[in-house]
Amino acid sequence: MSLKKPISSYRNGTFQNVYDDVVTEVPLTIFINNEEFATMVCSPFHFKELVVGFLFSEGVILFKKDIKSLDMDEDKGFAYVQLTKQLVHNQSFYSKRFIGSCCGKSRQFYFHSDVKTAKTSMTDASLSADQCIQLMENLQQNSDVFKETGGVHNAAVCSHSEIFVNRADIGRHNALDKLYGYCLLNNISVRDKMLVFSGRLSSEVLTKASKIGVGIVLSKSAPTDLAVKLAEDLNITAVGFIRGSSFNIYSHSHRITQNEKGDTTMGSCNIDHSEESVREKLESQKSYLPVSLYQNCKNILNENLHQDTLNEVFHLLKKYDLADEAEQQDRNKKLSTLVE
């Protein structure tokens, strides 16, 4: 969700008064057994999933049946949770705390509740290289709030070929907790599924992924050294820098396989690709395209193209760098017909 705000924008050497979409941020305070437990700032949607995912992730509850009731007052930003058990009063384990959108105290969780709730992956799931790239493209296509504001993290639980559920939030940990909560509330097993994430793979993100139960984590960004160590220890395949037609595998690479027979075909896809997505694909293939064809493609994207044309251009550019010379020549002809 977002709000339009009047701003002063500096572009091309001049200031302009325009309206911009600004992402919405709200506080959410959780009460457990009538006692204040935690306050976090988050995006104002999927509150119930966030609360449930957070409580599971922090080890407050281990089973869904531990929750006797959960009532939300979304207007005031309160969540009232009644447990079927007493809350553990141990200041070294739980404490009243403020959790910002960057989860500044999450290292405390790593040394305490994370030990209790992190899981070593036992998945047999695997992905082809092309599936890794396609799943990241699918996440970006479904990131509506980010497209509007640029102010949220996106995460999704996926099968081999499609997004099963995706969530967005100003806090990357919140986005993951919303996914966790959704799966828990709907009794969904994620052992054979994958996590696709827009942000950096930090140690906290890897720990969250292990709690959710996935064995493959795909990210557009870089991992940290501790995240890689955790991925190795927890038997999680960590894939980073998924951009264009390339990526890096940092742990347990056996789960990511070569495309069958070096497949470079465009494949089928039912997704409508945005102008922004086509531009990104074009830039990723710039060094492989003929200069004049690249420029013509770039120019045509300044026009109001029909969705079918955008889709066709996208798929002609997709994996262009992996195609052999004959196929590239064929694609060049088709692209030229569309853009000249």
Image (cartoon, grey):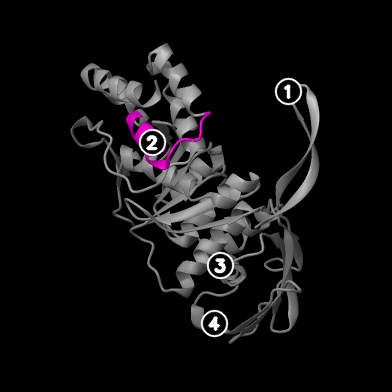
Q: CA distance from mark 2 to mark 4?
A: 52 Å
306 relative position to 102: left or right: left
Q: Residue at label 3?
A: 53
In the rendered image, the quadrant that contains the C terminus is top left
Q: In the image, which is nearer the foreground, mark 1 or mark 3? A: 1
* Numbered circle sitting on residue 66: 4
* Residue type, label 3: Gly
Question: Which residue occupies 37% across, 67% down?
Answer: 189
* Residue type, label 4: Asp
Q: Secondary structure at mark 4?
A: helix
In this picture, which residue range is highlighted in magenta? Answer: 302-316
Q: Main secondary structure of the magenta part?
A: helix
Q: Residue at label 1?
A: 12
> Earlier along the polypeptide chain: callout 1 or callout 2?
1
Q: CA distance from mark 1 to mark 3?
A: 45 Å
232 relative position to 269: left or right: right
Residues 138 and 295: in front is 295
Q: In the image, which is nearer the foreground, mark 1 or mark 2? A: 2
Q: In the image, which is nearer the foreground, mark 2 or mark 4? A: 2
Q: CA distance from mark 4 to mark 1?
A: 58 Å
Question: Which residue occupies 42% across, 41% down?
Answer: 307
> Earlier along the polypeptide chain: callout 2 or callout 4?
4
Q: Residues within 10 Å of mark 2 (few under 14, many from 20)?
A: few
The reply to whether dot 4 and dot 1 touch (C-beta < 8 Å) is: no
Q: In the image, which is nearer the foreground, mark 3 or mark 4? A: 3
280 relative position to 22: left or right: left
> Does the magenta portion include 82?
no
**Image coords of residue 192 (percent x, y):** 33, 58
* Residue type, label 1: Asn
